[in-house]
Image (spheres, helix red, strand yellow):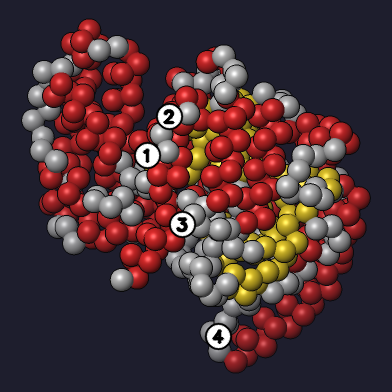
Amino acid sequence: MSYRYELKRPLLLYFMLATLMMSCAQTQSQGSKAFVDWASKQAIDMKDLNSGLGKKELWSLRTVIGSARVVGIGESRHDTREQVLLKGLLVRHMIEDFGFRAFILEESCPHAEPLDRYVTSGKGDLREIMNQLAGWYLWDTEEMLELFQWMRQFNADREADDMVHVFGMDITAPARGVLDVIGYCNGLGVDIGLSEPELGLDLQQGDFWPGTWGKYASLSDDQRIELGKNYEKLVETLVAGKQTLIASSSVKEYEHAMLMAEIGKMGNAFFSSPDRIEGGVIRERGMAATALWYLDNEMPKRKAIIWAHNLHVATGTFSMPELMEGTFGPMGMQMRDVLGEDYIAIGATFGEGSFPSDLPPGDRQFEKPSPEVMDGALAEVGLSNFLLDIRNVEKNSEERKWLSQERAWIAQDAESLLVPASSFDLIYFVKNISRAQPTPLALERYQSMRN
């Protein structure tokens, strides 16, 4: 993947910029070298991604995570086997050795609930559950399946209050949860006075949010306004009927219905947004609010892991010039605002690799990037897999200056621009990547999409 950008400027301006870039190149190279030298001394080596850490490495991991209550662990791409394995290794140690008990996934809240039932009770066919996730095209892989199987084994002989729980935080597939709200109210004799089409549920069939967004795009402004009003009515009906609903069910069931209604409202606002920037802001806020709700209501005083893309867990703004204008404030920024130093973010990088043509998304070639970007600089460290705490960089040092400048990072099939020092506390690196293995059921679904 290239990190070059086409400059469309008059000839004179082009040469002026080129001269400026050449004059800065030496300084940037010196900063990159200083950073690589520093990182080579500070890196926590994670040699084998298929087995646990040694005592020294485990102690180092405990030290860098410290007393954080919530740790967001990112990934450059959702479909890289080695990054999933390294994240899984971190997760297992954080659960087994450091007492983390909540696992919050970048997945639809209602769709993640069967996963929680599986890891806490063993109920359900895990392969079927994975294939019915709203984000099955992200998570239905053998590597993720093994991680959830491990969680089930971990929970098997534990008391209920010491089990790991799985939650979803995304708002992009709310239909199942809204249907649950309708059924909950109807079953208790509270008429919400709204049909499924009046809540846009007919537009959300399939739970593939880019498709839903496309269907919303065909709506008029008046139709979008009406949908928004209907979701306001849904929430207001639940609020007004609180005493009746709780008396006929329970506080827990009522609060769950309120959460699903609020997620439905946020999801509708996301789909109704006129552009990607506004939609992205709504989504990031929705994920942060949902994750915090679970921390406050389901897992009070328990430590949590958030598993999502780099551009969700980051604590600084980012941009994606290839796709859109403007900058985003990710979920991680809001988590930091609320939790302070109790939230830390771990960013992901990699060196090189390739994907085969016979697996989705098809042939991908990842060449070793320039040492002036984060992925390329860490490739110069010389270790295959490692974790790095960048909070320890000395102020006013060359490496600090380098980390405080905007850098390009791989983000799926595009590039993001962000400042490492303000975006992540820790960074992990894997030298070579390959495609995570879709399960047989996932491959069947991919095949059906082609036909």
**Mark 4 Cα-neighbour bin, 10 Å: few <14, some 14–19, many ≥20:** few
Q: Which residue is mark 2?
A: 123
Earlier in the chain: of badge 2 and badge 3, it is 2
Expressed as whole percent of the image width and height from the top left, the position of residue 327 reads 50, 56
Distance from disc 4 to disc 3, alpha carbons, whole Å, reads 50 Å
**Where the N terminus falls, by quadrant?**
bottom right
> Which mark is drawn over residue 440?
3
Distance from disc 4 to disc 1, alpha carbons, whole Å, reads 49 Å
> In the image, what residue type sits under mark 4?
Arg
Dot 3 falls on a residue whose secondary structure is: helix
> In the image, what residue type sits under mark 1?
His
- Residue 336 visible in the current orientation: no
> Which mark is drawn over residue 111?
1
Distance from disc 4 to disc 2, alpha carbons, whole Å, reads 61 Å
Earlier in the chain: of badge 3 and badge 1, it is 1
Q: Nearer the viewer, residue 396 or 384?
A: 384
- The reply to whether discs 4 and 2 touch (Cβ–Cβ < 8 Å) is no
Q: Nearer the viewer, mark 4 or mark 2?
A: 2
Depicted 217 relative to depicted 61: above or below: below
Dot 2 falls on a residue whose secondary structure is: loop
Depicted 306 relative to depicted 368: above or below: above
**Total numbered circles:** 4
